[in-house]
Image: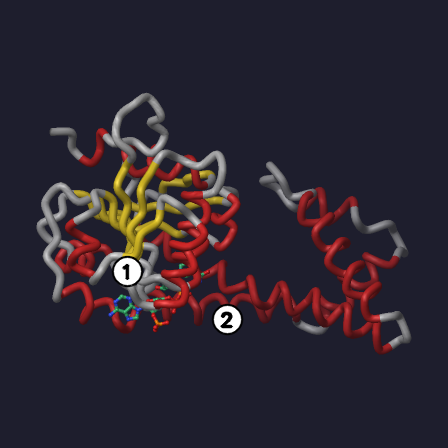
Amino acid sequence: MMNSRERDTSDRGGREPVRIGVLGTGRIAAALVTGLCSAGGPSCSVLVSPRNAEVATGLANRFNQVSVAPDNQALLDGSDWVFLTLRPPMAHDVLSRLRFRSDHCVVSIMAMVQLDALKTLAAPASSVVRALTLPSVSGRTGPILLCPADEDTERFLTPLGAPLPMGDERQLEVLWAMTAMIAPFYALVERSAVWAEGHGVESGAARDYAAGFFRSIVQALDGVHDMAPLIAEAQTPGGLNEQALRTLTDAGWFEALTPVLDAILARLTDA
Ligand SMILES: NC(=O)c1ccc[n+]([C@@H]2O[C@H](COP(=O)([O-])OP(=O)(O)OC[C@H]3O[C@@H](n4cnc5c(N)ncnc54)[C@H](OP(=O)(O)O)[C@@H]3O)[C@@H](O)[C@H]2O)c1
């Protein structure tokens, strides 16, 4: 009998598809299942939990590999790899009612539920790993943080993006805090477009340009470790970028980031 770790997601060589369960069928679960099941993804069968019914049936209708489990326990019983994608406040209640197996490989995508608690809730599962996938997992791109470093889980996640193992949970949570910048970043794009509209630019053009412009400058970050040269290159002496950066710095924009991120980190770690 093959164990769950031998059923690798990258396996296309005649072995049975890896059996994946996704518990908590919401936004990040939908992105994850899309990444797993879209063309070019790993050979797998996916069980999703029945709640939320709309998302679950939508995924089952869209992908042949996806079925809706009759209940949460049936999902665990029919899976080898189990992704936990519940909202943090409900995690304890939901998980403490379920029976895990010792050969389950559990990957929690949930914020605020620490490894010690997860290991207790998922006992006797021998492999319990926290991971942070982003919505971009739907297109199998983007970094995926994981902790503890675990070779099998890293290999398992590789088809979905770029796994980045973290040495300890604190580091995972610090980088997790950074992901709270998604909405502020999009708000920056939106506010720039709204500002242009306010100056008479037609709405479609303002929004197309804002999206295309910010996308193009984000692409310049690919493979970049040191942002200082990018910041310097963008500033022609006496130019527009130099003026904007100086004005925003003087207005306290960048200083304001530290307490914002500190507060997010405190929420992530104090729960
Ligand atoms: N969204 C992201 O981009 C993202 C990224 C990384 C990590 N995460 C983490 O992923 C987790 C889920 O976030 P989310 O944004 O995907 O939230 P979400 O959309 O609310 O998904 C949670 C799902 O769990 C379902 N649920 C509620 N009670 C349940 C139960 N008893 N059994 C099974 N499922 C139940 C909810 O159904 P109802 O809708 O019917 O309540 C909902 O569909 C969070 O811990 C979050 O920190 C999210």
Q: Quadrant of the C terminus?
A: bottom left
Above or below, 130 against 91 in this view is: above
For ligand 1, the image quadrant comes to bottom left
Which residue does the numbered mark 2 point to in the structure image?
259
* Residue 115 drawn at (x, y percent): 23, 55
The answer to which image quadrant residue 184 occupies is bottom right
* Residue 244 drawn at (x, y percent): 80, 63
* Residue at the image position 90 percent from the left and 75 percent from the top: 200
Ligand 1 contact, mark 2 (Cβ < 8 Å): no
Q: Nearer the viewer, mark 2 or mark 1?
A: 1
> In the rendered structure, which amino acid carries the disc numbered 2?
Pro
* Residue 110 drawn at (x, y percent): 33, 60
The answer to which image quadrant residue 80 occupies is top left
* Residue at the image position 24 percent from the left and 67 percent from the top: 91
Would residue 175 be visible to someone looking at this image? no
Q: Are marks 2 and 1 in contact (CB under 8 Å)?
A: no
* Residue at the image position 47 percent from the left and 53 percent from the top: 134
Q: State the SS at label 2.
A: helix
Horizontal side of 268 relative to 81 (left or right) equals right
Give the number of the disc on residue 49. 1
* Residue 247 drawn at (x, y percent): 78, 68
Q: Nearer the viewer, residue 20 or 96?
A: 20
Q: Nearer the viewer, residue 204 or 245?
A: 204
